Amino acid sequence: MTTLLRSHWDEVCALVRSHEDPFFHDPWLERIAFVSATKGTITLATPNRLYVEFIQENLEPKILHHLKSVTDVSWAIAYTLDSSLGPTTDQVLALNEDVPSKNNEDQSDAPITNPWQFRLNPTQNFTSFIVGSGNQFASAACQNVAESPAQNYNPLFIFGGVGLGKTHLLNAIGNRILSMRRESRIVFVSAEDFTNELINSLRYKRMEEFREKYRRRCDALLVDDIQFLAGKERTQEEFFHTFNALHSSGRQIVVTADRYPKDIEGLEERLRSRFDWGLVADVQPPDTETKVAILRKKSDEEGIELPQDVAFFIARHASSNIRELEGTLTRLLAMSNFHAAPITLEFARRCLEGYLQVNEPETSLESIQSGVAKFFNVKVQDLKGPRRTKQVVMPRQIAMFLSRRHTGLSLPEIGKRFGGRDHTTVIHAVRKVEKQLGSDPSFSKKMDLVARTVGLSTELR
């Protein structure tokens, strides 16, 4: 088979040149060398990783198309590096200033055993992911999927607010799959990029290449921010058929969104129903203890000792958005370095004053329960008790929502202090209130009044 393909390689290159603009093959194609062919995969040598990235984005679909036309066989491509084939990275960049280098990895001659791994962030893995009460279930589900793709939860749908680690989990799944099966073909893409690729494929009449990538040369499809497909009928149509093709052939699908499938307006019902075929797992904002763990891990990575009292101070007052939380710590470390001052609680208060709401008095769960009970003319004991009448259920759910939003207590702790309820009851209450806030203006006004009664911010949505 190797001999056959080597004899046809020049023919494939000629076909690429005859059908494409010279930009797409000169000088890039001239510095690709055929190495071998085995088990449905051909190996090509290129000068460096920049070539690999450019070829994957621009030439690979065309090469595969013409390979199939010449050999009547469908192939996958793997790459190895051979610096003797071409110019330096700087010279290549000069040829096309619009082709960015995606990382600063060492441009060594080590073989690239799987080109798909360059789509993933290698630093975002399960080891670097901090597990807390708000994401424990989602993390466990992701690890199960990564270790046994398409066996238990297919599709896996992960949802939660911005900056809570959904993208990290997607990368972790891809990296774990590759670490166990190096030949796996992982397609990691945002829903926005999926849409843009589809538009370009339709525009330039390359739908066969698009479908080849997403349906036939894909072992696991990881799609971030699927809510971006809402209202885009043609994109949803294509994703629907892509989903069916992958699912029916036993390949894993994982998607993330900022809300539950049924709450994504503009998403077709047939897609919603398919997301419910597998497992839906939510990622909740981290509690105080989890935020402390995140801060301590980041400070360890920076080689900085972060005092425990400072870590808890930041965790209590900083955003639950993990990126913003880490940004707060970065600011503190920078200020410490600038002033050549040790990081103490007093220094943190002074540096972060105005950046955090450090002077805002902490709100207790008891004060929320008391204020909500007073507003709705029920007893605090009713909120904690077993009664499930309408007059009690709604105030209880509102009190749980405000407790989750303003106290920093974990879900299990909130449930415990509402009569020993399970954390899933708290999750249900939070979602119920959030949904009504987004759809019922009269309910929103009532919540503003409740918040003012309790002495909280009225910015609830």
Image (cartoon, helix red, strand yellow):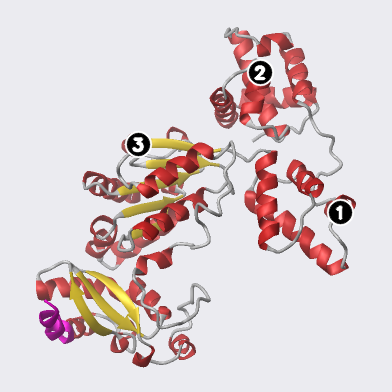
Residue neighbourhood size for the residue with mark 3, other residues' Cα within 10 Å, grouped as few (<14), some (14–19), many (≥20): some
Q: Which is more N-terminal, label 1 or label 2?
A: 1
132 w.r.t. 386: above or below: below
Q: Which is more N-terminal, label 2 or label 3?
A: 3
Horizontally, residue 49 falls left or right of residue 78, namely right
**Is disc 1 placed on a helix, strand or loop?**
loop
Q: Quadrant of residue 72?
A: bottom left
Q: Position of residue 404 (x, y in %)?
A: 66, 31
Q: Position of residue 126 (x, y in %)?
A: 50, 52
| 147 inside magenta stretch | no
**Is disc 3 placed on a helix, strand or loop?**
loop
Q: Specify the segment rendered in magenta.
A: 1-11
Q: Circle 3 is placed at which residue position?
A: 278
Q: Amino acid at mark 1?
A: Thr
285 w.r.t. 62: above or below: above
Residue neighbourhood size for the residue with mark 1, other residues' Cα within 10 Å, grouped as few (<14), some (14–19), many (≥20): some
What separation in Å lies between label 2 and label 1 (alpha carbons)? Answer: 36 Å
141 w.r.t. 205: above or below: above
Q: Position of residue 53 (x, y in %)?
A: 39, 74
The quarter of the image holding the C terminus is top right
Q: Amino acid at mark 2?
A: Phe
Which residue: 57% across, 26% down? 423
The quarter of the image holding the N terminus is bottom left
Q: Quadrant of residue 201?
A: bottom left
Mark linked to residue 418: 2
What separation in Å lies between label 3 and label 1 (alpha carbons)? Answer: 48 Å
Does the rendering let one see residue 423?
yes
Q: Which is more N-terminal, label 1 or label 3?
A: 3
Q: Circle 1 is placed at which residue position?
A: 344
Number of marks present in the image shown: 3
